[in-house]
């Protein structure tokens, strides 16, 4: 017998980048529109979506482990004789009370695209493999599950389609994808192969989503793209560049009296960070001053082997321009250690660059070969122990720099968007600054979702302790 959405539950497991988070949120809107309810636990869900990442092999290895878990969970949900219930007591108790109820498993995201033709064959536990270009087909999947039909064939289409909205229910901050794919082909990166070429979202679609978000009371947006500052979208007046898009969005926010007040963006490539973009950020009060600009390495020779299309000197020149034009900017970055052939001297150039730039935060990791990328075939692969040793040195250096950068902020009064109640102290709220710093302060729950002035009193780890300013 066919079920209605009101009878059905879903659950998402999302791995990887902010784009995956946004795409999970956009797909979730389809379930909500059909009346489905989010399950508190995957073991209680009628349909589970695993949104996957392929950037590092460790991410895919984790997914393979999860597929093993769901293979066992399916047996419990089907009440199969001999099904092992250890670690699956929640599902076992549910089935004991309600009877057998099948589980549908969907794998989407970059790993799904990379293994589009083999994943379901190699892992029969997977019912649907939804690649990069087929997310809009979830409506067909939902219908098939509601009607109790066997999995339908999901074919990819050659054109990427942006979802109308990536809003998460109840959120005051949300992601807004504005472009998809990448044309850069960094030699270590699998993204161009699983995400495809760059596609920019039309301006009118972006503004339409902002209007929808404003009706939901959203206060902050983060514009997303694999290479966000290479955006070139179409409008009624022609092609719009990323700096022009930022000005258009800010003007639209003002003209519509939108609830949205802060604009962030990720991820940006240094080679596309133009003087015009710096000027727009410096002058516009809506654009936050926390800027993530991935350097990846400090050696020009290594950057060339990575095909990053800029030198150490060009990156440092960009940083100087930003700091001069935007004195209150806080910079964050990505740093990769252990790229093939990396010498001791080249590694030291990473440390000296970090000390010169003085990042407020950094995502640090060692090179992990990805099958199908040029770097995976390069000679002089660095032994794992050396990569780990170098990574620890970089982490130690960054932690010391980070503490100094953050401590220099103590004593300032800043604007904070209050977003949640602190887990450590129910009488405190947590919020973030324009520079993307976390701040804990005493305040009423009614302040959540509002902008407040907070004095930064002290620093506890990477979180500021503050007090409200009347």
Image (cartoon, rainbow, N blue to C red):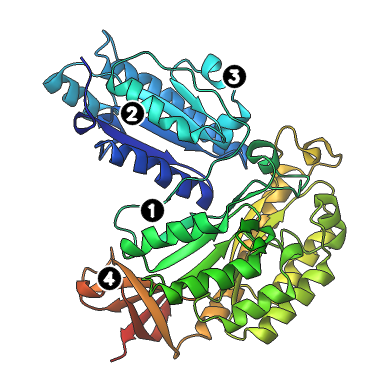
Residue found at x 24% / y 37%:
35
Secondary-structure class at tag 1: loop
The residue tagged 3 is 118
Can you say which quadrant of the picture contains the N terminus? top left
- Residue 462 in view: no
- Sequence-wise, which precedes: disc 1 or disc 3? 3
In this rendering, which labeled residue sits more in front, label 1 or label 4?
Answer: 1
* Apparent side of residue 298 relative to residue 279 in the rendered image (left or right): right
Q: Is residue 453 above or below residue 201?
A: below
Label ID, residue 448: 4
Label ID, residue 47: 2
In this rendering, which labeled residue sits more in front, label 1 or label 3?
Answer: 1
- Sequence-wise, which precedes: disc 4 or disc 2? 2
Distance from the alpha carbon under mark 2 to that under mark 3: 21 Å
- Sequence-wise, which precedes: disc 1 or disc 4? 1
Q: Is residue 135 above or below residue 217?
A: above
Label ID, residue 167: 1
Distance from the alpha carbon under mark 1 to that under mark 4: 18 Å
Tags 2 and 3 in contact by the CB under 8 Å rule?
Answer: no
- Sequence-wise, which precedes: disc 4 or disc 3? 3
Tell me if mark 1 has few (under 14), some (14-19) or many (20+) residues whose alpha carbon lies within 10 angstroms of its own: many
Secondary-structure class at tag 2: strand
Tell me if mark 3 has few (under 14), some (14-19) or many (20+) residues whose alpha carbon lies within 10 angstroms of its own: few
């Amino acid at each position: 017998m066919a079920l209605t959405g009101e009878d059905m539950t879903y659950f998402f497991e999302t791995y990887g980048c902010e784009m995956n988070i946004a795409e999970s949120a956009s797909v979730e809107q389809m379930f909500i529109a059909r009346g489905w309810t989010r399950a508190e636990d995957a073991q209680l869900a009628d349909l589970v979506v695993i949104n996957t990442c392929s950037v590092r092999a460790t991410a895919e290895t984790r997914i393979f482990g999860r597929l093993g878990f769901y293979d066992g969970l399916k047996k419990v949900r089907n009440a199969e004789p001999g099904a092992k219930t250890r670690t699956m007591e929640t599902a076992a108790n549910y089935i004991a009370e309600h009877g057998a109820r099948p589980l549908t498993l969907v794998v989407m995201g970059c790993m799904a695209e990379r293994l589009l033709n083999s994943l379901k064959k190699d892992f029969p536990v997977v019912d649907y493999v939804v690649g990069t270009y087929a997310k809009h087909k979830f409506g067909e999947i939902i219908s098939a599950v509601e009607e109790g039909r066997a999995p339908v064939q999901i074919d990819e289409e050659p054109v990427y389609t942006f979802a109308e909205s990536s809003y998460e229910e109840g959120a005051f901050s949300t992601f807004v994808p504005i472009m998809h794919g990448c044309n850069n082909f960094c030699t270590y990166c699998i993204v161009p192969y699983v995400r495809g070429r760059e596609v920019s979202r039309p301006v009118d679609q972006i503004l339409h989503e902002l209007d929808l978000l404003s009706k939901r009371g959203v206060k902050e947006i983060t514009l997303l793209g694999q290479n966000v500052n290479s955006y070139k979208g179409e409008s009624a007046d022609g092609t719009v560049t990323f700096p022009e898009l930022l000005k258009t969005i800010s003007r639209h926010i003002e003209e519509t009296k939108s609830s949205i007040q802060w604009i962030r963006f990720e991820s940006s490539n240094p080679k596309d960070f133009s003087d015009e973009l710096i000027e727009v950020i410096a002058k516009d009060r809506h654009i936050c001053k926390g800027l993530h600009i991935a350097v990846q390495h400090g050696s020009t020779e290594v950057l060339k082997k990575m095909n990053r299309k800029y030198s150490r000197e060009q990156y440092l020149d960009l940083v100087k321009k930003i700091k001069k034009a935007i004195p209150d900017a806080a910079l964050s970055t990505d740093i990769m250690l252990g790229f093939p052939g990396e010498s001791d001297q080249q590694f030291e150039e990473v440390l000296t660059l970090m000390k010169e730039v003085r990042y407020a935060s950094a995502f640090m990791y060692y090179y992990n070969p990805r099958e199908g990328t040029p770097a995976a075939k390069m000679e002089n692969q660095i032994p794992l122990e050396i990569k780990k040793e170098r990574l620890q040195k970089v982490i130690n250096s960054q932690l010391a720099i980070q503490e100094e950068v953050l401590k220099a902020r103590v004593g300032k009064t800043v604007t904070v968007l209050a977003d949640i109640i602190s887990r450590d102290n129910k009488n405190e709220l947590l919020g973030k600054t324009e520079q993307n710093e976390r701040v804990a302060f005493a305040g009423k729950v009614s302040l959540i979702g509002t902008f407040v002035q907070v004095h930064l009193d002290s620093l506890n780890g990477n979180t500021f302790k503050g007090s409200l300013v009347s």
